[in-house]
Image (cartoon, rainbow, N blue to C red):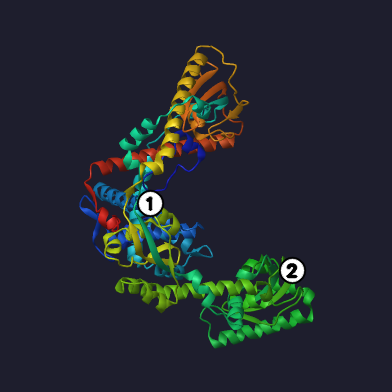
């Protein structure tokens, strides 16, 4: 599907300039053609419009499909993350906002313009022409009717017009762009040194009274979170593989049906003479064509050296006839099936008998073989593994709904589901929410575990997808409420913490005093600065994020320039800028690309600001319970 608004700030340059701007929208374009499908319950109200639960569900599935199509590993924990869910919902909300504005502004696209655009989309092309067959097939695979798809595309294109118009308002004069780029490309020769907190620990005194006082005042910090012991069972396509069986006939058939997939890097070059019989040919037409083809074949067999000459004279394929019938190099599966099967069984120099295809009768001469093919035996193990996994996926899809229903309907025990599907019931050690989210890689499962139905009523959780083709249901065996740790348990840790806090404070005081001296021109020869390194905004040369964020903020009008910052538990970081170089690179192409990225980043900001203004003046209400119904 067309994404009506795309994120422009993908280059490192834009990120450096705008500090990783996140454009809060990138329309999926799905809401227009999912309207009315499934549940109409509102996940969000956007003025007079709504984002339905069905639209939201489909948008989440769209995100998963996009990630899979791009070859990304789909992490269910990431999809369950509240930030991901909110981002998906924001996209749908912004789609509603923009659609409303487009309608209000009277934007219009004719049926003719829409048809022209869709017929030119590469997804629907075959041999560089629009294919109605491919169009219908793709829409069918995605569960779309032509009217819904075309309605969605019309909306996407209108939104694109609005977006492009706003983006065009952004303009950076060349002089200003070059000045900005000089800042972006700036190089700084720098050095750093650390005033270590650990060096001050021997000076620190912490009394037993200090430790007791801190514990009494901060008891909430020493609470053990609530914990559970669980039993759980898992239905996974991976675990089903062992029970699948594949026959030799199935593997051989798969190899034959997917020959192009297993061809290796083999290509073949062939020439042909085509005697065509036209579209919807009658039997008489085919007979006449065959007679002519047999006559030409007899001439070829009588004098193979004249193949090219006869192709020029008789072949009815205008693309290759003038080249003596030469079709060039091609891979298996490129040609029509009958032609393909004949060519890939021939030996170099061989001439085929008549080969009939939908285009007519072919006389084929194989002229060259390059690369290596793969035999059935070469790929037999790979085919077996693929077929086993396909069967496991099919079995999982067949069982998933029944598994989900059983753990829900027989919620007092996991045993019925385990017995019905041949699964093991496993047990966990004590787990906090955080521990469980990491163990199962699913916050959603742990939200259910700690819900009243599961925790208090001792029910199974719903079957939760914790990964691709993997469902888990759990139930609580034992529960420990949150409780405060005793003073004896934590006093040693509290003492170490208080010592470190005081040591950090002493390191900071010393660091700030030295920094003041350095700025006033007073040397500190005892400092052990690292050897100077040359950094840019994208080349840190091993320096920490803390150092990089401060070194480029230091005022370098007077050199050397000095700065400092508290460095976590380490102590106090002193920084020095010795020299600054601000010049554009020598590569004009790279400079122009960087300038275009800068322009794109500014355009994206304009569009983001426009959408933000729409949202501020529209009443938007989000039903958080529907967005994530298992929130505790």
Whether residue 360 is visible, yes or no, is no
Using residue 489 as the reference point, say whether residue 534 is left or right of it. Answer: right
The vertical placement of 271 against 109, above or below, is below
Image quadrant in which the C terminus is located: bottom left
Instruction: Residue 254 in the image: state x and y as whole percent.
Output: 58, 77
Instruction: Residue 123 in the image: state x and y as whole percent.
Output: 47, 62
Q: Which label number is shown at residue 368?
A: 2
Q: Which label number is shown at residue 192?
A: none
Instruction: Residue 143 in the image: state x and y as whole percent.
Output: 37, 68
| Viewer-closest of 464 and 371 | 464
The vertical placement of 144 against 355, above or below, is above
Question: Which residue lies at the image location 23% right of the left edge and 42% below the top edge?
Answer: 617
Question: Which residue lies at the image location 73% right of the left edge and 78% below the top edge?
Answer: 351
Using residue 309 as the reference point, say whether residue 141 is left or right of it. Answer: left
Question: Which residue lies at the image location 25% right of the left edge and 41% below the top edge?
Answer: 616
Q: Which quarter of the figure has residue 339?
A: bottom right
Q: Which label number is shown at residue 84?
A: 1
């Amino acid at each position: 599907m067309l994404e009506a608004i795309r994120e422009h700030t993908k280059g490192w340059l834009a990120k450096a300039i705008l500090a990783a701007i996140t454009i809060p929208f990138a329309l999926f374009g799905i809401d227009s053609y999912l309207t009315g499908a499934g549940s109409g319950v509102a996940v969000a109200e956007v003025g007079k419009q709504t984002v339905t639960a069905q639209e939201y569900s489909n948008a989440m599935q769209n995100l998963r499909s996009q990630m899979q199509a791009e070859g990304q590993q789909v992490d269910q924990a990431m999809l369950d993350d509240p930030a991901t869910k909110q981002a998906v919902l924001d996209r749908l909300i912004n789609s509603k906002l923009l659609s409303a504005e487009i309608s209000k502004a009277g934007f219009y696209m004719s049926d003719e313009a829409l048809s022209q655009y869709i017929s030119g989309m590469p997804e629907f092309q075959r041999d560089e022409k629009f294919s109605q067959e491919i169009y219908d097939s793709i829409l069918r695979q995605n569960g779309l009717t032509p009217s819904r798809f075309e309605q969605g595309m019309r909306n996407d294109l209108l939104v694109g017009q609005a977006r492009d118009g706003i983006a065009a308002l952004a303009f950076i004069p060349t002089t200003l762009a070059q000045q900005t780029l000089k800042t972006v490309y700036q190089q700084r020769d720098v050095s750093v040194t650390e005033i270590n907190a650990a060096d001050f620990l021997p000076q620190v005194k912490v009394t037993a009274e200090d430790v007791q006082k801190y514990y009494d005042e901060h008891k909430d910090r020493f609470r053990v979170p609530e914990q559970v012991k669980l039993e759980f069972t898992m239905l996974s396509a991976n675990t089903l593989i062992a029970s699948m069986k594949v026959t030799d006939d199935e593997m051989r058939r798969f190899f034959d049906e997917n020959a192009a997939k297993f061809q290796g890097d083999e290509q073949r070059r062939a020439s042909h003479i085509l005697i065509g019989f036209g579209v919807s040919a009658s039997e008489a037409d085919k007979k006449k064509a065959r007679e002519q083809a047999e006559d030409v074949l007899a001439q070829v067999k009588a004098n193979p050296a004249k193949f090219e000459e006869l192709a020029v004279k008789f072949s009815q394929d205008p693309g290759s006839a003038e080249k003596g019938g030469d079709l060039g190099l091609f891979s298996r599966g490129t040609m029509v099936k009958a032609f393909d099967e004949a060519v890939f069984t021939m030996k170099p120099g061989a001439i085929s008998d008549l080969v009939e295809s939908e285009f007519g009768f072919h006389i084929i001469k194989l002229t060259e073989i390059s690369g290596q093919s793969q035999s059935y035996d070469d790929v037999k193990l790979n085919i077996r593994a693929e077929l086993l996994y396909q069967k496991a996926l099919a079995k999982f899809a067949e069982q998933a709904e029944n598994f989900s229903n059983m753990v829900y309907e027989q919620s007092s025990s996991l045993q019925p589901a385990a017995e019905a599907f041949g699964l093991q019931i496993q047990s966990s050690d004590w787990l906090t929410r955080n521990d469980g989210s990491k163990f199962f890689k699913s916050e959603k499962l742990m939200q259910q575990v700690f819900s009243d139905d599961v925790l208090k009523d001792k029910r199974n959780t719903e079957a939760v997808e914790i990964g691709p083709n993997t469902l888990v249901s759990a139930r609580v065996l034992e529960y420990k409420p949150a409780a405060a740790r005793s003073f004896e348990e934590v006093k040693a840790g509290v003492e170490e913490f208080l010592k470190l806090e005081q040591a950090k404070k002493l390191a900071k005081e010393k660091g700030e005093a030295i920094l003041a001296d350095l700025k006033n021109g007073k040397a500190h020869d005892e400092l052990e600065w690292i050897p100077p390194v040359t950094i840019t905004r994208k080349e840190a040369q091993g320096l920490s994020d803390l150092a990089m964020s401060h070194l480029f903020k230091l005022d370098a009008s007077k050199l050397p320039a000095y700065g400092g910052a508290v460095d976590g538990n380490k102590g106090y970081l002193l920084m020095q800028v010795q020299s600054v170089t601000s010049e554009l690179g020598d590569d004009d192409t790279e400079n122009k690309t960087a300038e275009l990225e800068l322009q794109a980043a500014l355009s994206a900001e304009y569009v983001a600001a426009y959408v933000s203004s729409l949202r501020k003046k529209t009443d938007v209400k989000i039903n958080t319970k529907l967005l994530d119904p298992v929130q505790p």
